[in-house]
Image (cartoon, coloured by chain):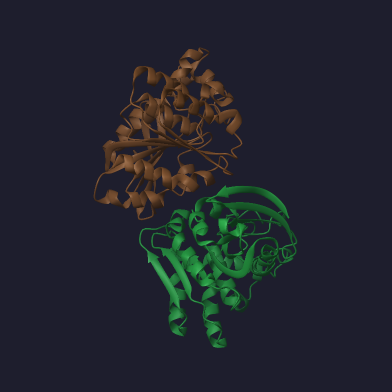
Chain colours: A brown, B green
């Protein structure tokens, strides 16, 4: 583990690290915000998954989350959005596939199947690493934005009992049915659409209901002026299946807000309070 | 005036504009945050001057200021840090001179004397433009960071009665006595160091005292882990002259904080409250 930077913020510390990941077979960068309380006690952790084109830095620089995290005594861990350092054909050509666009799945199509195991990294390796190396408890919650909102939802829905709470901003709730998801899932998972359903929040809510799994309440904020709302995000699909199977969902449509971090910043305090309550 | 973008944030609106400036003889970009209160009444304005390499976007994206501004009913206007669009020899080669580094002076050395009139732009043209085009009062306060902290201090000290309050983060308080200031003032103002004193906050506090000018209290936050503290920022110079002439100064040395926007974000709420009180 190599410390890249350490910056004081709201009495706590934002630290960036590089470490060797087994899951993605290479070096990964992540950031952790440790609130002031972490100097004297273990604190619970919120994992934040970012969207297309992002690194660990977008959230830390633009979300304005550390004031409230310091108040609540909440650590926040921000992984990168894909493995880095490989040079697969076309890997760096699109903003919505390859580097910066791992979609939080375990790829099964070569060459991505070699290293693009962001799901394993985010759900298992990174939390285990964080809990072994920092003053944090084993209480985990998860949230994210856009592609990362999709990631947060599937991580929670696929792992009942592992997360105390889940929320998302502008998530891709039904990636099997939108261009971003279809492109990514074809490239990472192949042509068999039946397999895709295991990585789609809307499908998982339905299959979890069939299995009688725990029904973790979902908190989602969605801007009504979001340019991607109609073609890519489609919250009404998730809303319909939640209503059908009785899965608790709070979907807040926020008038006038777009897809940017200015939207996230406007409501992040409420999400942090929601997670802190579940983690306490 | 051309609207570049309009983004909802904390119930208010962040708007970016381009307009033709007489002072700098060219197009300038600026941002204005209008809090929710501006929909029904005129609100006072805080001008924020950014530091070296910045544009209007650094503060708007990284300072986390709009939550408190929305609560206080304060508009915030962020100009760019230099004229743009010219191609003077060497203008774009250094991070600390030329584009992105206007130092908020009126240049007198050719070719910069042709367009680098950031002082006139920030003190006169931009406020007049803002007050003519937006739902704001004529109450003005000013703040800034690093080079912009220098800018805020000299704008207030050179214009008694014009600003209700002034504050700064990590300001260059004594540019006539540090490498950044010496380079910029030589390039913009020439070799005569006597002239430089009119653009140096520490010198202005002393000369204002001789003239019996209004003594606007100065609020300054300075990180003690700031890499530029010893060589460039030197708050002790301003502290000494304020003590000598009895100019009110609150200089807060903040242990562990660096020169970044993570530092600014940690204390911006207190600065906004300080300005809102003076503006009310």
* Apparent side of residue A137 relative to residue B129 in the rendered image (left or right): left
Q: Is residue B129 above or below residue A245?
A: below
Q: Is residue B187 above or below residue A6?
A: below
Do we see residue B230 in this rendering? no
Nearest the viewer among B172 and A189 is A189
From the top left corner, tell me how far across and down residue B93 is, in percent: 63, 53
Query: Quarter holding the N terminus of chain B?
Result: bottom right
Quadrant in which residue A75 is drawn: top left
From the top left corner, tell me how far across and down residue B154 is, in percent: 57, 72
Quadrant in which residue A130 is drawn: top left
Do we see residue B104 in this rendering? yes
* Apparent side of residue B107 relative to residue B212 in the rendered image (left or right): right
From the top left corner, tell me how far across and down residue B222 is, in percent: 43, 64
Q: Is residue B135 above or below residue A53?
A: below
* Apparent side of residue B100 relative to residue A265 in the rendered image (left or right): right
Q: Is residue A24 above or below residue A253?
A: above
Count of picture labels: 0
From the top left corner, tell me how far across and down residue A136 is, in percent: 28, 41
Nearest the viewer among A277 and B22 is A277
């Amino acid at each position: 583990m190599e410390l890249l930077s350490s910056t004081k913020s709201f009495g706590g510390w934002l630290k960036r690290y590089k470490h060797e990941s087994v899951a993605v077979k290479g070096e990964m960068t992540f950031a952790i915000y440790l609130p002031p309380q972490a100097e004297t006690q273990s604190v619970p952790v919120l994992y934040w998954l970012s969207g297309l084109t992002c690194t660990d830095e977008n959230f830390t620089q633009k979300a304005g989350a550390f004031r409230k995290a310091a108040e609540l005594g909440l650590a926040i861990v921000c992984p990168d959005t894909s493995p880095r350092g490989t040079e697969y054909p076309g890997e760096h050509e699109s903003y919505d596939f390859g580097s910066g666009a791992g979609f939080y799945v375990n790829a099964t199509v070569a060459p991505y199947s070699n290293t693009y195991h962001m799901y394993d990294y985010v759900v298992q390796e990174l939390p285990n690493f964080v809990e072994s190396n920092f003053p944090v408890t084993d209480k985990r919650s998860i949230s994210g934005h856009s592609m990362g909102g999709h990631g947060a939802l599937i991580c929670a829905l696929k792992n009942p009992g592992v997360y105390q709470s889940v929320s998302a901003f502008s998530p891709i709730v039904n990636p099997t049915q939108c261009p971003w998801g279809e492109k990514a899932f074809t490239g990472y998972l192949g042509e068999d659409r039946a397999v895709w359903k295991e990585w789609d929040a809307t499908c998982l809510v339905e299959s979890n209901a069939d299995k009688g799994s725990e029904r973790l309440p979902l908190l989602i904020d969605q801007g009504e002026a979001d340019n991607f709302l109609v073609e890519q995000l489609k919250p009404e699909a998730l809303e319909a299946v939640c209503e059908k199977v009785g899965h608790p969902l709070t979907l807040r449509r926020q008038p006038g807000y777009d897809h940017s971090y200015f939207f996230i910043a406007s409501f992040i305090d409420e999400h942090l309070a929601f997670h802190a309550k579940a983690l306490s």
